[in-house]
Amino acid sequence: MDQKSAPLAEALKQIENRPLVGFGAPGHNQGAAIPSGMRALLGKRVFQADVLTPKGLDDRTEGALALQRAHELAAEAWNADFCRFVTGGSTQSLHTVMAAVAAPGDTILIAANAHKAERTYALASGLDAVIVSVQIDAAWDIEHGVTPDALRAALAQNPSAKAFLLVSPTYYGVTSDVAALADICHDHGIPLIVDAAWGGAFAFCEGLPDDPLTKGADAAVYSAHKTMGALAQGSVIVAKGNLIDRQRLWMAYELFETTSPSVPILATLDATRRDHALGGEQMWRKVLSRAEKLRTQIAKIAPLRVFSREDVPADNDLDMTKVLVDVSALGVSGYAVDDWLYSHHRISMGLSDASHILAVISLGTTQSDLRKLVHGLTDLVKQLSADPSILPRTTPAPNVATLSVDMAMPGPAALNGAAEMVCYEDAAGRIAAEMLAPAPPGVPRLVPGQRISAQHVAWLVAQRDAGAFIMDPVDPTQATIRVVAPTSG
């Protein structure tokens, strides 16, 4: 196929040249009616591009096959047998793939550092989500991937599992030994699904880690908006081989995808695929060069510490565009550093936690951006040295390795049954009735049905007091947590 073609972007251009006379949705009618203030803020062209796929981007029956051709081109670009563009983010993509491999009541194996998207779908659909332990880096207090031995043990205990869902790369850029994990899954006759939200560009540059499909994964999900240049919520599902029923995957896609997908998002996915297929190697070599320069410069700012390939476990790899910095030697939290950089230098980090900040270097990262970050960190260290009181001092938080997963009752029963609110400090021994997922990275630390340990309480209290952001807790103040009422436990 001609990878120079971008059917969706080309069809959108035709609409600009030959405007439609529309009597359907969207009601703004290509910008004829724009909400007050939005013309000055966004411009009219974003509304002109906001059309539907049928009777807009294409004809009533989608006879020009613009979307279908875009999917076929993307499948070829990622060396897949199946591809679909998704406008609801990789959360929707993961829900789609999970629906294609497991039915309510089935068991599915999920890596312990999976995003809340995987756990929410299992909770809502009645899947039995069995958590597979991941490697813990004690020196950095971060989670890496799943080892082959951990997967073998999980499959031995759960021989009826329908699939294994792995996160690779992690939010910190570390990949697992996908080839070994795929072999284990295939020996058990089940597919390996890879949440590669941060690895969509891997297929297009030799300097990046290997794309999971090239290592035997049966399906992968990419967030093309995270680093590749597509609009937010732009995601891609790819599948290869015969372990996943492609008809069922197609039907699951139709089940979850809106009938009015955002054409601007779809067009940017299409154009992003074209750019990467034609020039991904050169594009990402520049990004890698900038990331390496940033690593070198930050490493010179004492006492900051930069995560590198030497810190990666054997048989794993590192996406060098993810620059993880340990700030704990400053005596302040990563949250406080993140907030200070935002307030004083208008710098927003990709992630912060009790000990770290993370810079994600992507296609849109400029040399000026890098200079500002280095300047901001240098300024922070200087300011702290002169006056340590400018940021609150912190004590080390409990290690992530202290957190366990003990499911005391089925998640749906805990979510839907009688519940009450108790203080964090009084929650040890109770059963969670809500999900707590500090974000980013959005990894659930408690889910409905999970027994809350004293270690969970200590970790959550420490993270909360240090400045963690919990995604949509029942109690926004993070003072109390929803737990199963005694009569239901």
Image (cartoon, grey):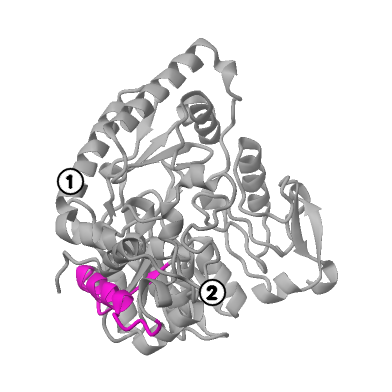
Position of residue 287 relative to residue 87, above or below, is above
Using the image as rendered, state which of residue 379 and residue 28 is in the foreground.
28
The amino acid type, in three-letter code, at marker 1 is Arg
Q: CA distance from mark 1 to mark 2?
A: 39 Å
Is residue 170 shown left or right of residue 130? Answer: left
Percent x, y for residue 216?
25, 73
The residue labelled by disc 2 is 129
Percent x, y for residue 353?
52, 41
Percent x, y for residue 455?
63, 51
The residue labelled by disc 1 is 285
Comes first in the chain, label 1 or label 2: 2
Which of the 4 image quarters holds residue 361?
A: top left
- On the question of residue 210 being in view, the answer is no
- Residue at 59%, 17% (x, y): give it: 389
Give the residue furthest to the right.
487
Which of the 4 image quarters holds residue 14?
A: bottom left
**Does the magenta portion include 24?**
no
The amino acid type, in three-letter code, at marker 2 is Ala
Label for residue 192?
none
- Residue at 44%, 15% (x, y): give it: 382
Location of the N terminus (image quadrant): bottom left
Mark 2 Cα within 10 Å, few/some/many (few <14, many 20+)? many
Location of the C terminus (image quadrant): bottom right
- Residue at 55%, 31% (x, y): give it: 336
Position of residue 243 relative to residue 32, above or below, is below
Is residue 34 shown left or right of residue 275? Answer: right
Is residue 187 shown left or right of residue 254? Answer: left
Using the image as rendered, state which of residue 311 and residue 227 is in the foreground.
227
Magenta span of residues: 60-86
Position of residue 171 relative to residue 289, above or below, is below
Mark 1 Cα within 10 Å, few/some/many (few <14, many 20+)? some
